[in-house]
């Protein structure tokens, strides 16, 4: 029995200080472990309990743990998880597949072929984002891995009707739009975490796949897994989204990350008993 565990990272498994959701009294707050440093400053955290559970999970020889993220390779490689290093990682929303930390060139070429066939070019989408964004709320505009584009914005100032118009414009060109915190992503529709997860499952011979995620960009991943979980925060929770194989957790913030790792462990124990 081989169990593939594919988990989204930001706001699912790891949390910035702004996303921790520590609503309890200070003396009841969980102890935290920093798992990412950027420009010499701590950036992302797990609870110490979640870190211990993840170390136990990745030590199980039946488990293939696959960090699965929209982050670029460089952003992903800042993270230092406890436990055994992940043999595979999915970055750039499925556009990059890392094998022992090295990008798989065959996978990247296959992705490029699909995008060229099915979607409007990245240059067109990026140019449109710049043309329609308001300098009053736009802070940064970026292209990631030559695959997709995103904006860093002042969320409270972005009109809902602007976001809806962007979704319609992008959808007609084979792209999807996702709002995650202060970032607005424009991603080619065929660029999916689920396709990369299926490739890792094929390579490892996984019998069962487990997954977790919080955003609309994770929906395909959750639907493709045999069992999946989403936290009580994020785009999916806000939309009330669920599916028969997806468990909607009531916990939000960093404690949801802890609960997700605990659920992974319980599922693995049941499957391998």
Image (cartoon, rainbow, N blue to C red):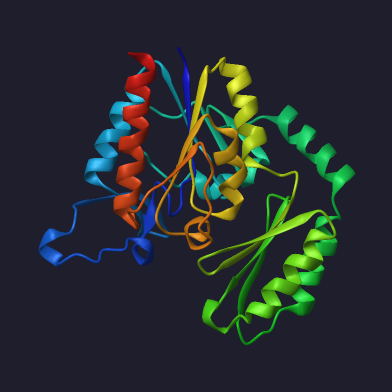
Residue 180, image x, y percentages: 54, 62
In this picture, residue 269 sits left or right of residue 141: left
Horizontal and vertical percent position of residue 120: 86, 55
- Residue 6 position, x and y percent, is 50, 34
- Above or below, 46 against 131 in this view is above
Residue 82 visible in image: no
Q: How many labels does the image show?
A: 0
Farthest residue, direction front: 244
- Quadrant location of the N terminus? top left
The image quadrant that residue 24 belongs to is bottom left
- On screen, residue 116 versus residue 138, left or right, reads right
* Residue depicted at x 41% and y 51%: 231
Image quadrant containing the C terminus = top left
Residue that extends furthest to the bottom in the rendered view of this protein? 136
Residue reaching furthest to the left: 27
What residue is at 23 percent from the left and 44 percent from the top?
A: 48
Q: Is residue 125 left or right of residue 206?
A: right
Among the 4 quarters of the image, the one containing residue 247: top left
Q: As rendered, which of 155 and 214 lies closer to the eye?
A: 214
Q: Where is residue 220 in the image (x, y as percent from the top left)?
A: 62, 43
Q: Choose between 85 and 221: the one closer to the eye.
A: 221
Residue shown at 17% from the left, 59% from the top: 29
User: Would you say residue 46 is visible in this rendering?
Assistant: yes
Q: Which of 192 and 134 is in front in this view?
A: 192
């Amino acid at each position: 029995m081989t169990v593939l565990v594919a988990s989204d990272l930001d706001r699912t498994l790891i949390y910035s200080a702004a996303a921790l959701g520590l609503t309890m009294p200070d003396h009841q707050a969980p102890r935290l472990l920093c798992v990412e440093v950027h420009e010499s400053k701590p950036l992302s955290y797990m609870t110490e309990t979640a870190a211990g559970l993840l170390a136990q999970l990745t030590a199980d020889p039946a488990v293939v743990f696959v960090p699965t993220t929209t982050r670029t390779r460089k952003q992903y490689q800042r993270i230092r998880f406890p436990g055994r290093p992940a043999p595979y990682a999915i970055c750039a929303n499925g556009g990059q597949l890392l094998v022992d930390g090295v990008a798989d060139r065959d996978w990247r070429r296959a992705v490029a072929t699909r995008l060229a066939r099915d979607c409007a070019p990245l240059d067109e989408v990026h140019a449109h984002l710049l043309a329609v964004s308001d300098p009053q709320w736009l802070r940064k505009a970026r292209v990631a891995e030559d695959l997709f584009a995103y904006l860093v914005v002042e969320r409270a100032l972005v009109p809902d009707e602007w976001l809806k118009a962007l979704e319609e414009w992008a959808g007609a060109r084979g792209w999807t739009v996702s709002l995650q915190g202060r970032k607005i992503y424009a991603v080619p529709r065929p660029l999916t975490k689920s396709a990369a997860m299926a490739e890792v499952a094929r390579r490892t011979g996984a019998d069962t796949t487990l997954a977790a995620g919080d955003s609309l960009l994770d929906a395909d991943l959750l639907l493709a897994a045999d069992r999946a979980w989403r936290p009580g925060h994020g785009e999916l929770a806000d939309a009330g989204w669920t599916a028969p194989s997806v468990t909607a957790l009531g916990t939000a913030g960093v404690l949801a990350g802890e609960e997700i790792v605990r659920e992974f462990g319980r599922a693995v124990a049941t499957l391998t008993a």
